[in-house]
Amino acid sequence: MVKLLKDQGLLAERVRIQARGLSTQEAIGNPEADDFPLQKGKERLMQADFCNALGQAFTDQYGDFEGTLDEVLKMGLNNNYRRALFVASLNAVLRHLKQVEKTVHCRDEEPTRCATDLSRYLKNRYGRVKIAQVGFQPRMIEALAPAFALRVMDLDPDNIGATRFNTLIEGPEATDEVIRWADLLLVTGTTVVNGTIEQFLGEKPVLFYGTTIAGPAYLMDWERFCACGR
């Protein structure tokens, strides 16, 4: 990746990160529901602008940044803020280079449509498998719970132990057992920012979802689902 950017002469280009936290309206519009993590204020979307190409990343640690791409690449990735800054920048750069698409979150009624498309995609590609969903994405749970054996894990204490759409939301202490149980791991791209991604990269098939993982999935050749991103 660094060689590619050097060859393209892009390392000195400036990247601007709008990380004050996009408002709900800016990030997802009006989805006609109030149970998304963005709406609860637990996470924000950091948005990078690189040569007018946009890339986003979910994070619970955010702040503004403006500097060269070289500065971003040399930054130590030792907390969620820095990893989100790096991933948002990576997504924007690869979008600029026309290597990835759907790097901006879907809006309004699109999350519901995405979840319906996901259920159809999973049935066609994997059949009636047991799914471990990592990350509380309510429309996906709502769409998948009636159609699959589903277990859901999340890091938010407000979600853990609650039942949503007849599905218990489990905490990180259940990770090993849930992975053993599942045939397929359906994993939020936010794991690449919060530093938990490696525990899901093992023997079980993994399907990542969302915009955050766009660039990393392209570089690592991971399967990714994002039906309605922009």
Image (spheres, grey):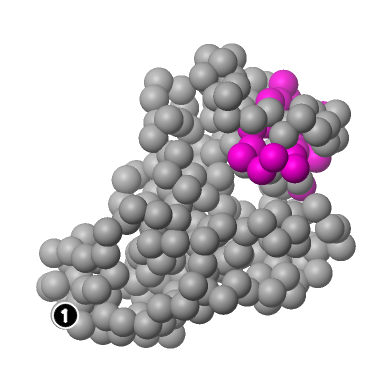
Say which quarter of the image contains residue 174.
top right
Say which quarter of the image contains residue 121.
top right
Work out whether residue 42 or residue 185 is closer to the camera in this orientation and state it: 42
Q: In this view, does 21 lie to the left or right of 201?
A: right
- What are the residue bounds of the magenta stretch? 139-159
Work out whether residue 130 or residue 80 is closer to the camera in this orientation and state it: 80
Q: Is 187 above or below relative to 15?
A: above
Return the residue at label 1: 9
Residue 71 lies, in percent from the top left, at 24, 73
Residue 117 visible at all:
yes
Residue 112 lies, in percent from the top left, at 77, 53
Residue 100 visible at all:
no
Q: How crowded is mark 1: few (under 14 residues within 10 Å), some or many (20 or more)?
A: few
Q: In this view, does 96 lie to the left or right of 196?
A: left
Magenta-colored stretch includes residue 145: yes
Magenta-colored stretch includes residue 193: no
Q: Which amino acid does label 1 sit on?
A: Gly
Residue drawn at x 64%, y 30% as measured from the top left: 171
As helix, strand or loop, the secondary structure at mark 1 comes to: loop
Q: In this view, does 149 lie to the left or right of 98?
A: right
